[in-house]
Amino acid sequence: MKRLPSGARTIEVARLLVSIFAGSTLLGGEVQAALALSSQAFQQSEHNLGELLIETSAFLRDSEVRGNQLSTLTIHPDWRTDGEFFTSRLDLIGVAALSDQNSFTLESKEAFIATSPRFTGNHQIGAGRRDFALSALDAFWKTGTWTPRFQWSPLKPENVGNLAGYYQYQGERFRFIAYASPISLPERGYPVRSVQGELQSTSPDWVAPFEELSLLDRQVDIRYELMYPDLQELILQPTAGVHFRYGTGSGFWAQAGFARMPLHQVELALEASLLASSLTLDAKIHPRRNAHLLGSVEMGYQGNSSGVWVSLNSERPLLLDRSPQEADWIATPLGPSQLGAIGVNFSLLDGLRLDSSLLWIQEELPPPVPGEITLTTPSRYAYSNAARFRAVYASESAVKYTVEWTLDIPNQSSHTSLDLEYGLRSGVSLGVGADIIASSTGEGFIGQYFGNDKVRGRIAYAF
């Protein structure tokens, strides 16, 4: 590989690593094995639900790099059983843009089978994908630290469960969970594809990377190519951890967790070579996984109408063995991180819930190695210091209002989300909403979407 000239040691592709591979359909849908068990072992729950949703978003500003509207179809079956011996859940979500049939993406939020409390009492053994809410910080901020996310909508990610076999003890006030798995599924979102050297996506939230670069006062075209790795390299990543919790849904509570698991986000390493004859930068994108050690301590108090919580997390990336071929690849540097958050909540009137939280994250990145090409990329964390306020009001007349405001403090950017939903007796619900992006810098996770203000309408049917 021909190295770039020393004057081009910093390659500005700051938005290249944002969601390129998060939406790849490499993994496809998770195929769930059919459970041929007796009717005594499984009995269908009264809460078998599903939802079919059509949503259309229209942007308030025209753009040459994205479409001005998008319509999506979402199917969300949620099948549960609670029998004498076993309990299970299969919670799937499938999303597709109506204008692109190849955009269909299937994800499982939870998919597990476990022994029933009626069979094993306080002890439970299970396997599959399950969200145990291992961290209050991760549940509120959706950082993707403890729990992977489904990022079809990057500004509104959804937490999904970790894949593992587990043992759980649930006492009156104490809970213990031990979990382990030889495989792990990375985060996914909307699909991105490589077409004739360009990276493209149907999603209007896709932030395209630079198409050319200035080297030695000359413009150089960049040609991208996604290199699909062996599936085993992505999923054969072991996970093991324990979780302790004291307390119930009210009063004082405390919890702690320790784990060794792969990073849920796929790392995109860049193999760059300069074709001098055509002044073209050949950029091959190699998806790969990293691992880290995690620890957290959280505590709080939940009263009848208010509560407070605090969370401290420590994370240390692990150095994995790489092949000699990968030595020249350029990747985002990783370093130990400290994550902290404090949150409060209030329940006012009937049906009004207020939540707010402050988040801070500090990552100690290693110093650059002299003589190596560096890559300026976004942080693997959406925020380093942020505040969030959320208000939800669900009235007795089947009307639900949701307002959420997130402030990226260092980058002086904010995202305001407004939603109104009205439920009809027939199982049909109607909704309207808006997303407003404000930024004085255009930097950071929120700032990169400046100009993507939009309104949306939706119709859903619950079955």
Image (cartoon, rainbow, N blue to C red):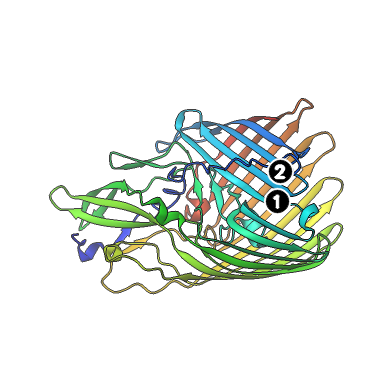
The amino acid sitting under disc 1 is Arg
Q: Say left or right for 376 vs 433.
A: left
The amino acid sitting under disc 2 is Thr
Residue 267 in view (yes/no) = no
Which quadrant of the rendered structure holds the N terminus? Answer: bottom left
* Nearer-the-camera pick, 163 or 118: 118
Quadrant of residue 32 in the image? top right
Name the residue furthest front: 38
Mark 2 surroundings: few (<14), some (14-19) or many (≥20) residues within 10 A = some
**Looking at the picture, how far across and down is residue 120, in whole percent?**
77, 57
Name the residue furthest left: 277
Vertical position of residue 396 compared to residue 175: above or below: above
**Label ID, residue 428:** none
Vertical position of residue 357 compared to residue 316: above or below: above
Do the numbered discs 1 and 2 sit on residues whose CB atoms are within 8 Å?
A: yes
Residue 92 in view (yes/no) = yes
**Looking at the picture, how far across and down is residue 311, in whole percent?**
67, 68
**Looking at the picture, how far across and down is residue 252, in whole percent?**
81, 68
Q: Secondary structure at mark 1?
A: strand
Seen at 65% across and 56% down, the residue is 139
Q: Secondary structure at mark 2?
A: strand
Mark 1 and mark 2: span between their CA atoms? 7 Å
Q: Earlier in the sequence, mark 1 or mark 2?
A: 1
Residue topped by disc 1: 390
Which quadrant of the rendered structure holds the C terminus? Answer: top right
Mark 1 surroundings: few (<14), some (14-19) or many (≥20) residues within 10 A = some
Residue topped by disc 2: 402
